[in-house]
Image (cartoon, rainbow, N blue to C red):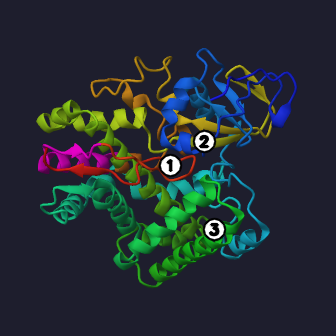
Amino acid sequence: MGIMRPNPTTPAGAAPGCPVDESFDPLSPEFLADPYTIMARLPSGSKPVFFAPSIGYYVVTSYDAVDQVFRDPATYSAAVAQAPLVPIIPEAQQILLAGGHKPQPSMVSLDEPEHARLRKPAARAFSMKRVTAMIPTIEATTARLLDAVGDATEFDLVAALAFPLPANIVFSLMGVPEQDYAQVKQWCGYRAALSFGRPAAGDQVAIATTMAAYRGYMRDLVDAKAREPGDDLASDLIAIHREAPERLSLDEIASILFSLSFAGHETTTGLIGNTARRLLEDPARWAGIVREPGLIPAAVEESLRYDPSVAVWRRVTTRPVTLGGVDLPAGSRLFLWLAAAGRDEEAFADPAAFDMGRTDAGHHLAFGKGLHYCLGANLGKLEAQIAVAELARRYPALRLVPDQSLTFHPNISFRGPQVLLVRTHP
């Protein structure tokens, strides 16, 4: 991390007077391996907003500044939430557009009133009543997945549990046939690369072709549920369409499902992996939750603050505004570093310490805030709690395999170990 210098002119598109860090690159191998080391190198007392030429975004690091952005959706538009970081080549653009992948593909990229019109029906799937009713299914799925581990003394916790559990739950909720789970899960990985990574031009056509197939699958699923409704979200949304077609079109239903199929599991896979990692890296923490399972909800909240599975989200200014002491023009793209906000000393006492006894961990911004607060927050936390509880019950002596090198998907927003090797016995 280079020393941030003042910016009296406007190099690389930065606002006059805004600090610039030319070495900050959230897709560099060093950053992907350990963003918290990069975070610790930021000059103390520096402004909470600086410009990163590598991505053309203003990086927002303080809790208060990120909170200000989330609370003012009129000033800070969601339009860039899923915008590709690199230009998409024309051939790939044509494939995406032909496949129905519009520039604003889902409700997380929409502002009011369009956002509310799509969010309201989608929220039905995540009411506390429906989420609570899913507890037996989540518990049974967790048990079945860990039964498959059997008597193994060593296994990959991500492949065995963190990866399949949330996918199975959200796909079932949506109405995706079980035989299609693996295919949809694979498509989701390509989506992360397209919107949140830096795919080379040579890879973009393959990714775009895959994304078009993913879009087409969701539209076909809507048509299938229209013919034969079931007890699932897709059928619920189609019922709303039939009551008032002008309120919700079939294409919009497909867009909602496209959004939820990704957001409903990718983030929870990371949450389970991150929580397990942080608990297991200190044997005393793991012993604590084995001894006192009532600590698990607090451990999940602390993981969301300390090492969130959604590390970054994005916004763009709709008008000139002052944020974190920096005067930004309209059209400024913001890189909301949620992971940094969770470790802000102004917001949390001793933020670099993982503390399951922390009483204010739940004030984190890992699920956003305000109009775009994550619909699946309660479901994701519940899945993580049930997963950790069953791991602790079955494997009280669980340990991380020593000296393993963790890898992370090369994207700016979603973070969790791709592999987490554990041992069931000391």
Residue at the location (60% across, 44% down)? 28
Side of 76 relative to 254 (left or right): right
Q: Earlier in the sequence, mark 1 or mark 2?
A: 2
Q: From which residue to which does the magenta span run?
A: 381-402
Q: Amino acid at mark 3?
A: Glu
Q: Main secondary structure of the magenta part?
A: helix
Could you tell me if the residues under marks 1 and 2 are in contact, i.e. CB atoms within 8 Å? no
Residue at the location (72% across, 70% down)? 92
| Viewer-nearest of discs 1 and 2 | 2
Callout 2 secondary element: loop
Q: Amino acid at mark 1?
A: Phe
Q: Position of residue 105 (x, y in %)?
A: 64, 61
Q: Is residue 263 above or below residue 203?
A: above
Residue at the location (35% across, 68% down)? 172
Q: Earlier in the sequence, mark 2 or mark 3?
A: 2
Q: Residue tagged by mark 2?
A: 26
Label number found at residue 50: none
Q: Judge whether residue 385 is colored magenta.
A: yes
Within-10-Å neighbours for mark 3: few <14, some 14–19, many 20+: few
Q: Residue tagged by mark 1?
A: 414
